[in-house]
Amino acid sequence: MSSGKSPYIDVVVFLAVLVAGVVLVAVAHVPVGSIATFAVGLSALYTAYQRKDDGSHRDDDK
C-alpha cells in the first residue's frame, strides 16, 4: 500500500461493494448471478487501481 493512503481503504471499498450488492438485490430485484459479475468487475478495477498506486507495475523494464 502506498504511504499516502489510509490503511482502512480496503475495508471501505469492500463494504461499499457489499452494500451496493445488497441494495441492488433488495431494492432493484437484480438476480444474484448478476451481482457476482458486478463484484468481480469492481474487484478487477480496484486491483488495477492498487497496482497503479503501488508502482509495482513498471514498463521501463523492457
Image: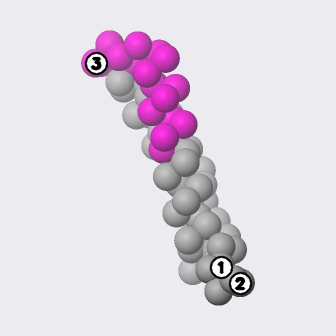
Three-letter amino acid code at disc 3?
Ala
Of label 1 and label 3, which has the lower sequence position? 3
In space, the residues marked 1 and 2 are separated at their CA atoms by 6 Å
- Label 3's element? loop
Quarter of the image with the N terminus in it: bottom right
The span shown in magenta is 25-42
- Label 2's element? loop
Look at discs 1 and 3 and give the one toward the viewer. 1
Q: Are marks 1 and 2 in contact (CB under 8 Å)?
A: yes
Residue 12 in view in this figure: no
Few, some or many C-alpha atoms within 10 Å of disc 1 (few <14, some 14-19, many ≥20)?
Answer: few
Residue 60 in view in this figure: yes
In space, the residues marked 3 and 2 are separated at their CA atoms by 47 Å
Look at discs 3 and 2 and give the one toward the viewer. 2
Three-letter amino acid code at disc 2?
Asp
Q: Nearer the viewer, residue 23 or 53?
A: 53
Task: Residue 12 in the image: state x and y as whole percent.
Answer: 52, 51
Q: Write down the residue under mark 3.
A: 28
40 falls in the magenta region = yes
**Looking at the image, which residue is at 43% across and 21% down?**
34
Q: Write down the residue under mark 1.
A: 58
Residue 10 position by quadrant: bottom right
Task: Residue 26 in the image: state x and y as whole percent.
Answer: 36, 16
Q: Write down the residue under mark 2.
A: 61
